[in-house]
Image: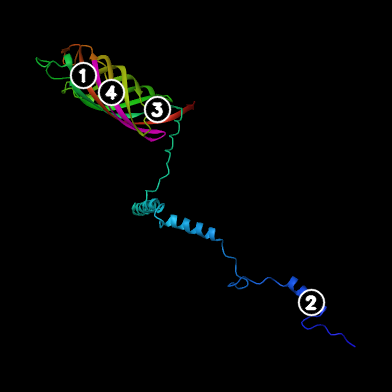
Amino acid sequence: MRLRPPPGALPAATLAASALLSLTAPAAPPEGKAEGDLPAAAPDARADARTGEAARDGSDGSDGALAAPERAARDAQASDAAARPPPPPVKPRVELAARPPPLHVEYAQYGVALVAEISLDPGAVCPRSGPLYSCILGSGGGLAIRGGYRSPGPWYFGGAYQFTKMDSSNLYRLGIFQQLRAEMRYMPDIGYRAAPYFSAGIGGVVYGNEWGVETGGALIFGGVGVELEVSRRAVLGVSCVYRPVLIAGWKDTANYERGTGIAQFVGFELLLEVRTELGRR
């Protein structure tokens, strides 16, 4: 005879299976949410985020009053920067190449020059009245030959021989005025091929007919010039000097006594000189 369970009672096996399923099954999602949805942010966090956005946008009426002018200022600065022309490109500084130091070279310098002697005043040699009115010593032209030493610095020291055919008013067939001079030049270094110089010197003179010597004297001079360095070994130049000459009195070929006096000349030269290197320092 079988015993039947009371009505409504479940078998023990059924109760055990139900308990096992309740332990392993996932919890049901909250009402109104589907499974797999992310959890919503906390209400306080959402409120703080909305408050920050309102402050940045100026919608809450407090901090927005400060944010709006700042944003307008930023916009104005951006528009000014766009309208302003770009600054000119910065050119790199180019350092001027330093001029190389001069070559400290010693030279022997020599050459020739075409010369002109312009008489300013013959002095007592040609009185302005009387039988000696015809001037035996006028202007003329000729040739100069010179040579000297050119130092590594700005100095030149040398000598020159010059002969000039002078206008003698036909009292001489060929009046030759000869000079032998010691000369010096000072040539400042200005960094160009063409350079000015100052010259000075002393010397002696003789004068007579057809290379003869009938009188003599002494001279000094000073002047200026310009020297153009065509190459390291060739020089062209022009110069102008003032030259007073003391001439002793003499009796000329017409038996007229000429008095001692100072004749004044202005000399012009067109010179060509070459250099020979002597050594280096």
**Which kind of residue does numbered mark 3 sit on?**
Gln
User: Is residue 201 located in the magenta-colored stretch of the structure?
Assistant: no
**Which kind of residue does numbered mark 2 sit on?**
Leu
- Asked whether the residues under the numbered discs 2 and 1 touch, taking CB atoms below 8 Å apart as contact, a structural biologist would say no
Our reading of the magenta stretch's main secondary structure is strand
Q: Which mark is residue 274?
A: none
Residue drawn at (75%, 70%) of the image:
23
Circle 2: is it few (<14), some (14-19), or many (20+) Cα within 10 Å? few
Viewer-side label of 4, 3: 4
The residue that mark 2 highlights is 15
Q: Which mark is residue 223?
A: 4
Going by the image, does 151 lie left or right of 123?
right
Does residue 173 appear in this view?
no
- The alpha-carbon separation of the residues under discs 4 and 3 comes to 19 Å
Q: Position of residue 45 (x, y in %)?
A: 54, 58
Q: Nearer the viewer, residue 132 or 88?
A: 88
Going by the image, does 177 lie left or right of 31?
left
- The alpha-carbon separation of the residues under discs 3 and 2 comes to 136 Å
The residue that mark 1 highlights is 264
Q: Earlier in the sequence, mark 3 or mark 2?
A: 2
Q: Earlier in the sequence, mark 2 or mark 1?
A: 2
- The alpha-carbon separation of the residues under discs 1 and 3 comes to 29 Å
Region in magenta:
223-245
User: Is residue 238 located in the magenta-colored stretch of the structure?
Assistant: yes
- The alpha-carbon separation of the residues under discs 4 and 1 comes to 14 Å
Q: Earlier in the sequence, mark 1 or mark 3?
A: 3
Q: Nearer the viewer, residue 55 or 179?
A: 55
Indicate the secondary structure of the residue bearing disc 4: strand
Q: Nearer the viewer, residue 141 or 1?
A: 1
The residue that mark 3 highlights is 109
Indicate the secondary structure of the residue bearing disc 2: helix
